[in-house]
Amino acid sequence: GAVVSQHPSWVICKSGTSVKIECRSLDFQATTMFWYRQFPKQSLMLMATSNEGSKATYEQGVEKDKFLINHASLTLSTLTVTSAHPEDSSFYICSATGQRDTEAFFGQGTRLTVV
Amino acid sequence: AQSVTQLDSQVPVFEEAPVELRCNYSSSVSVYLFWYVQYPNQGLQLLLKYLSGSTLVKGINGFEAEFNKSQTSFHLRKPSVHISDTAEYFCAVSGRAPQGAQKLVFGQGTRLTINP
């Protein structure tokens, strides 16, 4: 089956620093990747959709300058949280889909804690 | 636009009892429907999906769901639960597209707790 690997699984960073999260499709070409954010005991909220080689499409209310998304290849997308603050602490999950897929495949998530 | 409502935030059930997790959706276009399970600090695992065809969909771990277009529902059922089924369950909907999966809209989640 399709495997999506997300790295790191957890990260702690100091307030004001930037953190990069990677999302890789290991055995298929991901034409589209999705980035979600999940607060404790809540549902997943879509942050942005990225298509390979194009600029990401951000959902309303998501700061594109704060959450930088790059999808430079068919197997890798990155989310960079810039100048992180404690309120950015959350669980970030990516998913990826190929051109012929009817479902997206999820990574294992990244727990970000900003101190 | 689509929306999903999971009617129960928490469902406690005794081991080996049957369970139903309810999900209703709203959409102005045809949709695909999904159920995912999430264990603590992990990503989502697909239980089952409805794309077209038979309205009764069977998934992994003994789960099944029935698509009811007139009631816009997609309830998840299991005839006999195990302790290991304790987890968060999410119902989700996406639009249909000729190529590639579309973004998912999730319900609020249902916490299933299995008691011995």
Image (cartoon, coloured by chain):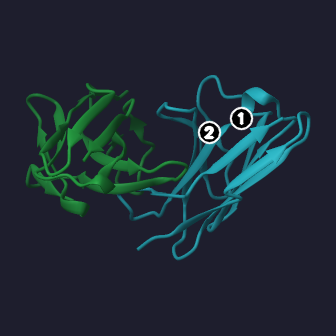
Chain colours: A cyan, B green
Q: Nearer the viewer, residue A9 or A62?
A: A9
Measuring from the top left, give residue A34's x and y in whole percent.
55, 48
Residue displayed at 71% across by 35% down: A89
Q: Residues within 10 Å of mark 2 (few under 14, many from 20)?
A: some
Please tell me in which quadrant of the rendered image residue B93 appears: top left
Q: Nearer the viewer, residue B30 or A18?
A: A18
Q: Which residue matches tag 1?
A: A89
Q: Give the quarter of the figure containing the N terminus of chain A.
A: bottom left
Measuring from the top left, give residue B85's x and y in whole percent.
30, 52
Q: If you read the primary sequence from the N terminus, does the residue marked by circle 1 or circle 2 appear first?
A: 2
Residue flagged by tag 2: what amino acid is it? Thr
Residue flagged by tag 1: what amino acid is it? Ser
Residue displayed at 26% across by 25% down: B7
Residue displayed at 37% across by 50% down: B37
Label 2 marks which chain's residue? A
Q: Which residue matches tag 2?
A: A57
Q: Is residue A22 above or below residue B6?
A: below
Residue displayed at 14% across by 55% down: B57
Label 1 marks which chain's residue? A
Find numbered disc 1 in the image and state the secondary structure of the residue it sits on.
loop
